Image (cartoon, rainbow, N blue to C red):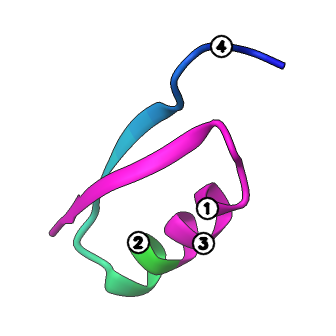
Amino acid sequence: MSNQEPATILLIDDHPMLRTGVKQLISMAPDITVVGEAE
């Protein structure tokens, strides 16, 4: 087990469906956190 904090990601894309899909995929990774979204 690692003592590192999770990587933080800001999702930026103009397609809401793409952002939603990528966010769902990233949410399955315990070592990555989505901190925000933008168009």
Q: Secondary structure at mark 2?
A: helix
How many other residues sit within 10 Å of disc 1, few (<14), some (14-19) or many (≥20)? few
- Viewer-proximal residue among 35 and 21: 35
Question: Disc 2 designates what residue?
Answer: 19
Residue at 60% across, 72% down? 24
- Viewer-proximal residue among 36 and 15: 36
| Left or right of residue 38: residue 13 | right
Alpha carbons under labels 2 and 1: distance apart: 12 Å
Looking at numbered disc 2 in the image, what kind of residue is underneath it?
Arg
- The quadrant of the picture occupied by the N terminus is top right
Whether 37 is among the magenta residues is yes
Which disc number belongs to residue 24? 3
Q: Secondary structure at mark 1?
A: helix
The stretch in magenta equals: 21-39
Query: Upstream in the sequence, badge 2 or badge 1?
Result: 2
* Quarter location, residue 15: bottom left
Question: Disc 4 designates what residue?
Answer: 3
Question: Disc 1 designates what residue?
Answer: 27
Q: Nearer the viewer, mark 3 or mark 4?
A: 4
Alpha carbons under labels 3 and 4: distance apart: 24 Å
Whether 3 is among the magenta residues is no
- The quadrant of the picture occupied by the C terminus is bottom left
The answer to the question of whether label 3 and label 1 lie on touching residues, with beta carbons closer than 8 A, is yes
Looking at numbered disc 4 in the image, what kind of residue is underneath it?
Asn
